Amino acid sequence: MKNKIILLVEDNPKDEVLTLRALKKCNLANEIMVVRDGAEALDYLFAKADYAGRYVEDLPTVVLLDLKLPKIDGLEVLRQIRGDERTRRLPVVILTSSDEEKDIIAGYELGANSYVRKPVAFDDFSRAVAELGRYWLITNEPLPKEGGKAK
């Protein structure tokens, strides 16, 4: 699990703390990069502004993306991720409190790998985040770094 980074895009401080606690509780010792708005998420992913020194090809293993974000909303973040050759295959899980059908449809149409509604109860939330972390960091076989083209 070395070098597997989770990018958490979350503007709600309480949800951030709960997510970090849930990941720690299930013993996922991976680095978790937290950004708090859509613009910062894109800056991180594309190595701009405060992240200009970051190697842009060194992508997180998975992005946990809230939808209702300041500056740039989650759907636009997803649109830009899928629109760039460097990030178009990056696993993105929408982790949001929205259960609006239009958000679910838009998320999948834009290429989300999964759509998870945040449960209200802490135990349920913790269990959902732990399952996401285990799946994307342990169970899932990621795309090889060499470009992932079939031979």
Image (cartoon, helix red, strand yellow):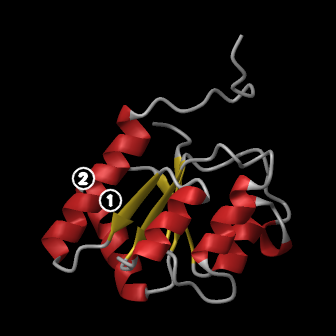
Q: Quadrant of residue 79?
A: bottom right
- The circle on residue 23 is 1
If the image is split into quadrants, where does the N terminus sit?
A: top left
Mark 2: give few (<14), some (14-19) or many (20+) Cα within 10 Å.
some
At a point 63% along the width and 26% down the height, the residue shown is 144
State if disc 1 and disc 2 touch (CB < 8 Å).
yes
Relative height, residue 113 to residue 103 (above, below): above
Q: Position of residue 39 (x, y in %)?
A: 72, 78
- The circle on residue 151 is none
Q: Quadrant of residue 25?
A: bottom left
Tag 2 residue: 26
Q: Position of residue 38 (x, y in %)?
A: 65, 77
Judge by depth and name the residue closer to the eye, 77 or 57. Answer: 77
Q: Amino acid at mark 1?
A: Leu
Q: Quadrant of residue 124?
A: bottom left
If the image is split into quadrants, where does the C terminus sit?
A: top right
Q: Position of residue 13 (x, y in %)?
A: 42, 87
Judge by depth and name the residue closer to the eye, 95 or 106. Answer: 106
| Residue 101 visible somewhere in the drawing | yes
